[in-house]
Image (spheres, rainbow, N blue to C red):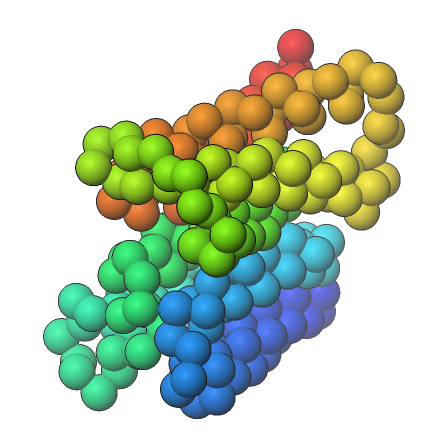
Amino acid sequence: MYQSDLLGVAAVYIYVTVLIIFTEKVFSKRYPVQARKFLHIMTGNIAFILPLFVTREIMAFVAAGPFILFTFLMSPYSPIKSMRGKTSEAGHGLGLVYYAITWTVLAYVFFDHRVIIAMGILAMSYGDGLASWIGIKYGERKYTVFKDTKSYVGSLTMFVCTFLLLIIALAFYSEPLTTRTIAYLLCMAGVATIVEGITPFGLDNLSVPFVTAVMYWFFLVG
């Protein structure tokens, strides 16, 4: 393991640990639903730690992979009752588990294109997270797909935030931003919004990032 990998693993573990402690011990006591959204959104900042890693397996299986088990043990389905977190119980029980699975898969498959990993993570965290948060607070007009109710305001938020975060990802990873790229990012944001709107049971933590990542991959190789 290279020194940069060690720094990356340490940065991820410290950041996520502080985030979980804050949401579980402070935020969730009074605002459990908002705490879950806060954790969901802020975990997305991992997208900006990715450049520290130089080894595919370290990012995927040391930095990301262990969180699959850890978040499951924090979920309502955990066999260890003392580890069940208030934050996970406030929303979809396996939402954070899907989050960890997504990052692990993206890290391994798209390691040579960090911007793709970042796009998937940011679309899932900020895009989906803010859509849900704002939709719950301001979304009076709603629609139902597969018995899952969402709001038009939330979907609009998903589109706008995802588009802006995709641009931020490109800028952070020093990728060129051309007119063609912007048009494609608008298309990606639109598709991600549709996918988020029609995906039931909290599975959008899987569908949204994978669709976003694959779309940009085809853009790169096309």
Tell me if 55 is positioned left or right of 20 in this view: right
The answer to which quarter of the image holds residue 147 is top left
Locate residue 217, reporting x and y percent. 60, 24
Residue placed most toward the observer, 133 or 25:
133
Q: Residue at x 58, y 57 (%)?
A: 44
Label total for image: 0
Residue placed most toward the observer, 9 or 27:
27
Residue placed most toward the observer, 16 or 161:
161
Q: Residue at x 48, y 88 (%)?
A: 26
Instruction: Indicate whether 155 appears above or below 32.
Output: above
Locate residue 201, reporting x and y percent. 25, 44
Instruction: Indicate whether 98 appears above or below 109.
Output: below
Locate residue 208, reporting x and y percent. 46, 36
Q: Residue at x 43, y 46 (%)?
A: 140
Q: Quadrant of the N terminus?
A: bottom right
Q: Residue at x 47, y 36 (%)?
A: 152
Asked if one can make out residue 21 in the rendered structure from this viewpoint, the answer is no
Asked if one can make out residue 84 in the rendered structure from this viewpoint, the answer is yes
Q: Quadrant of the C terminus?
A: top right
Query: Which residue sits furthest left?
Result: 79
Instruction: Indicate whether 105 appears above or below 163.
Output: below
